[in-house]
Image: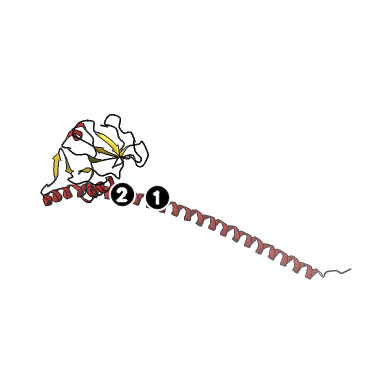
Amino acid sequence: MIRLVPHRTSALHISYDNMTKERDQLQSSYDNMTKERDQLLDINNNLTLERDQLQSSYDNLTMERDAIQQKLVTPLFTVFLFEEMCFKGWRKFGSSYYYFSNGRKNWAESRQYCREMGADLLIINSREEQVRGVNIDAWIGLSDAQTEGIWKWVDGSPLTTVYWSTGEPNGAHKDEDCAVNEVVSLSTWNDIPCSSEAGWICEL
């Protein structure tokens, strides 16, 4: 039988105790590092959330700024535009100006023409707008191209007051997704293919 010398046994106990302490210290350091890592991850997640919220706020403010600028610029643009044109081809009804074309284009081309002049195709909001000064078939800013049967104005507003001709809209032919105002009277709207050619009315 091998017998350990007492002083050697004591040294082993001391080494064991030291290694145990080192292990506990390492475990404590590991636990602390784990906590710090989790804290850093939480901080990163919070910063990411704050960044996304700030980006969203920035985007909203940018949209509001652009809308305000448009409101400020449009009246000035209107004055300069009509001074330059000497109001040629434009008529003023109430607070709006209207352009009645002499030529014929399809619906998309007609709208593009209006937009290049800072306007858009006519949106009819009242009986007065419906019966004023139209003596040709003319595109108005009304379409159901996005969703069949759901007619909307070019500004995205839904159709509420209607002036369809009797039996219209009927979709008699394929892709009758755009509206024309055909003659001077109260109920004259007709749905026809957007690729057809007609006059047009711009509103500013």
From the top left corner, tell me how far across and down residue 128 is, in percent: 18, 33
How was the colour assigned to the protein in this rendering? secondary structure
Q: Amino acid at mark 1?
A: Gln
Quadrant where the N terminus sits is: bottom right
From the top left corner, tell me how far across and down residue 106 is, in percent: 27, 46
Q: Identify the residue at horizontal 31%, vertical 49% (top origin).
A: 63
**Foreground label between 1 and 2:** 2
Label 1 sits on a secondary structure element that is helix
Q: Amino acid at mark 2?
A: Met
The one nearer the camera, 34 or 62, is 62
* Badge 1 density bin: few <14, some 14–19, many ≥20, Cα 10 Å: few
The one nearer the camera, 17 or 132, is 132
Q: Which residue is mark 1?
A: 53
From the top left corner, tell me how far across and down residue 61 is, in percent: 31, 49
From the top left corner, tell me how far across and down residue 40 is, in percent: 50, 57
72 displayed left or right of 155: left
Q: Identify the residue at horizontal 27%, vertical 50% (top origin).
A: 66
Label 2 sits on a secondary structure element that is helix
Q: Are marks 1 and 2 in contact (CB under 8 Å)?
A: no
Q: Which residue is mark 2?
A: 63
The one nearer the camera, 64 or 134, is 134
